[in-house]
Amino acid sequence: MNTAPKIVYAFGPYRLDPDQERLLRDGQPVAVTPKAFEVLLALVRRSREVVSKDELMRMVWPHTVVEEANLSQSIFMLRKALGDTSGMRHYIVTLPGRGYRFAEPVREITPNDDDGERSRWPPPAAPVLDRAVVSFPRGRWKYALVLGVALIALLIGTAILVRTYRATALATADPVLVADFVNRTGDPVFDGTLRQGLAVQLQQSPLLSLISQDRIQQTLRMMDRPADVPLTPALAREICERTSSSIVLDGSIAKLGSAFVVGLQARDCASGKVLDTEQAQAAKREDVLGALDEIAGKFRTRIGESGAMIARHNTPLAEATTTSLDALKAYSQAVRVQSASGSAAALPLFQRAVAIDPGFAMAHALLGRVYGDLGDSALAMQSTGEAWRLRNHSSDAERFFIEASYQLEMTGNMEAARRVCESWIRTYPRAMIPHAFLAGIVEPESGNYRAAVAHAREAIARDPDFVIGYSILAYGYQYQGNLAGATRSLDMAAARKLSTPDMVLQRYDIAFLRGDKHEMDRQAAMAKDLSGAADWMAFHQALTLAYRGRMRKADVLSEQATALAIQASQRERAGLFKAGAAWREALFGDLSAAQRDARAALALSNNRYVEFGAAFALALAGESAQARVLADDLQARFPEDSSVRFSQLPALRAQLAINDGKPAQGIEALRIATPYDLGAPRSSMHGSFGALATVYVRGEAYLGLHHGAEAAAEFRKILANPGVVESDPVGALARLQLARAYAMHGDTARAKAAYRDLGDLWESADPGVPAVRQAVAESVQPH
């Protein structure tokens, strides 16, 4: 009886035996873990094909939910076992955003017959030069003759051969780490400055991806190293290996008489082998940035970037950043401090950078981001606008950031922001930030939550230590109603020891949506010890209490949130809290309190979200004249803002029409909002207010027209999207309005059921709340 021979996979000096679960090199066993072996086998069986991370995880862990870090660890161990250095990926190649590919040709052989090739894979390629070592399979002497002739031809042009080899050795799909420059000049202005300058230059390359400062800081934390430790060549190599990167760039600067010599070495992270060396001279201190331009251009050539591409994306540093080394030093320090210690600590350094050089575009742009983080939208818009005015004094990559920030923060024009981000991705396919902008702001506002999730995953794939990416991903899942996916995203961040105060708030909101009171209390307790979270948590607690009709306690917590914000000099945030209080008070029928808090909010801030919340509360409270003034002001100040145009103004105009006894005009005013109805407005992205406001007001307008069925359809939309609504009081009041719509339509059974559901929700509500009193009265005899 004939049996099929056992198959062993052969590649290079290695043999992979599936039956024995053994990996051999030149006949000697190579130690790998069982799961790493399965990963290798899966890649080998699909040699030359791209295998996605999801596919690999399904094949190797078919019945277990595991984090992606398990796969990354297996890949890391396999590369070590195979001697796959990060500068020369012979075997396992990473394709960012796509997966892994086994690059070597694979042969199927019988265990005792190395020549017993089968036809499943293409035959191995002709022998090639490998680091000046040439070998030939047995019986292939004719190839040696052919290669000998080729070698003679190549030796005639040795310089070309060396250049080609170096370019190939440096070509990599993995990120590059830039170490601190060794400063032998005695001039402290170069400390940290040259590293930042080189990074700016290399980031102009569409082919390169640099390890982000955030990822460096996270790795240092995992290593128990101080955040401000210098990135010496040795430390940089260790970080490079830990982040599965390929190349570390070591720089140096020294004096040569009155001149300066700037050097750069590219090293393989794993072996430390020098892959490239560049050097340039500067006649004087002011010419050092030009020397950096020169060595960066040479390095980009070495990685295989074409001259045409370099010419298109090669703004000199003095034009892309600043001519002042002192300004660049302050900026470099600010970038590092912001990553390690936050925006408040970085603020004075960014301010110093723009004070030294008011024409430093990117410093203005990041200063605008810092002001935004600290809750000062007026100064944020001022700095962002100045960066946009100076945008032609920046590199192409930085110009995309500046233009996207301008559209997101200044104009609020989401379609313009989308166009900028999409062009950014086409030009720089390895860029992470445009995916984050699309996932976190642009797509949610238009209700494209699937696209938001896809972009969030792309951002994380490009930088697994981008902590905000996990938060954005969680929001994307939550908006779709996928609370398990949202929780899993936050757990993925926790597994990497990544966290932000906002994640505690997210977990609190998810627990609310699940009805998990114990988890809500646990997260609220955690927030008390987190800087910048206590006031937000108090406000979130106020919202969830108000949702259940417990207005007295909600008022106490809302006042506490406002007081904490004012104490922290966050007047804009305090204004947002006051506007949120006015919003819920108006919805629940406490009109005098709504008017009082709306005016208090406007006294604190005229931020567009504060102004909208106050205007809507005033409109609900019957203060139509003042609400119109505020609506007109929003339209005048933010004519391009997508949220203002397609959500805020339609909701305000429609409510004012209802106040005037013209509900049909209200429905017409809301027509422009229809495509954006289910989006998450920026004012609601931290669990404040404004979600589905246009849907709620349209339902009210239909009630005003006595169109019960149409009104019910609108209120059902709100209840069908709890992940978007969260604890916005609109979600609670929609239940009352739904009961009224059913009663108006003559559907008594459904009306009674809706009132019963509302009674369960408001079982512990304060009895004096107007909306609660009305619900109790109406539930006795729906009509």
Image (tube, rainbow, N blue to C red):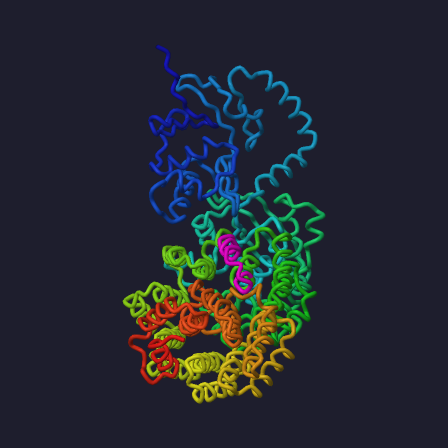
Q: Quadrant of the C terminus?
A: bottom left
Give the answer, above or below, for where 606 lies relative to 529: below
Relative image position of residue 325 (x, y in whole percent):
62, 67
Where does residue 542 sit, x and y in percent of width and height? 37, 77
Q: Nearer the viewer, residue 380 or 691?
A: 691
Range of residues picked out in magenta? 443-459
Q: Is residue 519 above or below residue 203?
A: below
Q: Is residue 343 above or below residue 400?
A: below
Q: Residue 416: percent from the left, percent from the top? A: 64, 64
Q: Is residue 476 left or right of residue 253?
A: left
Residue for point 58% across, 29% down: 129
The image quadrant of residue 640 is: bottom right
Percent across and percent down for residue 383 are 61, 74
Return the residue nearer the eye: 137 or 113: 113
The reply to whether residue 276 is in sight is: yes
Q: Main secondary structure of the magenta part?
A: helix
Residue 153 position by quadrant: top right
Q: Residue at x 36, y 73 (%)?
A: 544
Q: Is residue 190 left or right of residue 395?
A: left
671 relative position to 6: left or right: right
Closest to the observer, 425 or 219: 425
The outermost residue toward the left is 518
Quarter of the picture holding the N terminus: top left
